[in-house]
Image (spheres, rainbow, N blue to C red):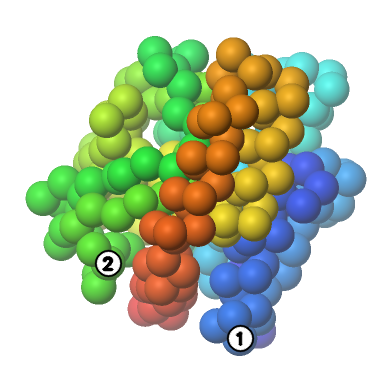
Amino acid sequence: MLRLLIIEHAPERADGVITLFETLKIEFELCRIYQNESLPEVGSLLGVIPAGGPMGVADIGNPKYPFLTREVEYFDHVIKAGIPILGICLGHQLIIHALGGQVSKAVVPEIGWSQVSLTDAGKSDLLFNGCSASYETFHYHFDEVSTLPPNAVVLAHSKYCQVQAFRIEGRPIWGVQYHPDIFPGHAAKILEMTAQRSPNLMTADMLQTQIKHGERVFDISISLKMIENFLAICKK
């Protein structure tokens, strides 16, 4: 039986994706690649979702994260086999790198809840079928796509990040920079940690504003719809 694979890069970093899958009663396989778990044979896969993580593309080759090199090489096999792949945050950036694009330090890091807007291409894309043209979602990234790989199409952008989502034309390859997998409770913990460690990035006032804002604007139906759409793509 073909399987959907979720790749986790650090403890609890795939929890939101897992929650979405479990809510939709979708069977999946989890690879904790940071624990040196084996990646399954490509021929056994229905689709792949590499989730977020605290490391970055610049850490490829870093002996602290030896699994990143292995993962990027694995993507090459997944992509050549035509297996659908949807990267989230770090996963999005690793796919861009694997395809020959570039990831650099963000001009303006995005931390917290803010709006993303679909481009015209995004409004007609299969991944966003049934999703709002613009909506609030959670962001947490200090890097961003600076050069797109060949045949990439931008599907969404935000005020400070021009590549919030992309696809490769004619191939089942997608990535989103933002976090459809992070819900208000988890987001609050992340923001509280940021306020403690880096009060210049998240003041006490900003923290409370962001927590209340997330509780007000988060719409899980959009996240669920994206996963449903990806599953439909995988089954085609």
Quadrant location, the C terminus: bottom left
- The reply, left or right, for residue 157 in relation to residue 95 is left
- Tell me the crowding category of disc 2: few under 14, some 14 to 19, or many 20 or more residues within 10 angstroms, Cα based: some
Q: Which one is earlier in the sequence, the residue at label 2 or at label 1?
A: 1
Residue 25: which disc? 1
Q: SS class of the residue under badge 1?
A: loop
Q: CA distance from mark 2 to mark 1?
A: 20 Å
User: In the image, is residue 197 above or below residue 151?
Assistant: above
> In the drawing, does residue 103 fall left or right of residue 211?
left
The image quarter in which residue 62 lies: top right
- Residue under the point 43% across and 59% down: 216
Determine if residue 82 is in view: no
Tell me the residue at 35%/51% (across/down): 136
Q: Position of residue 55 (x, y in %)?
A: 68, 28
Residue appearing at x 41%, y 66% in the figure: 219
* Left or right: residue 17 compared with residue 189: left
Q: Residue furthest left?
A: 120
Relative image position of residue 44 (x, y in whole percent): 65, 71
Marks counted in the figure total 2
Question: Could you tell me if the residues under marks 2 and 1 are in contact, i.e. CB atoms within 8 Å?
Answer: no
Question: Which residue matches tag 2?
Answer: 131
Q: Nearer the viewer, residue 197 or 23?
A: 197
Q: Amino acid at mark 1?
A: Lys
Residue 22 placement: quadrant: bottom right
Residue 27 visible here:
yes
Q: Is residue 107 above or below residue 143?
A: above
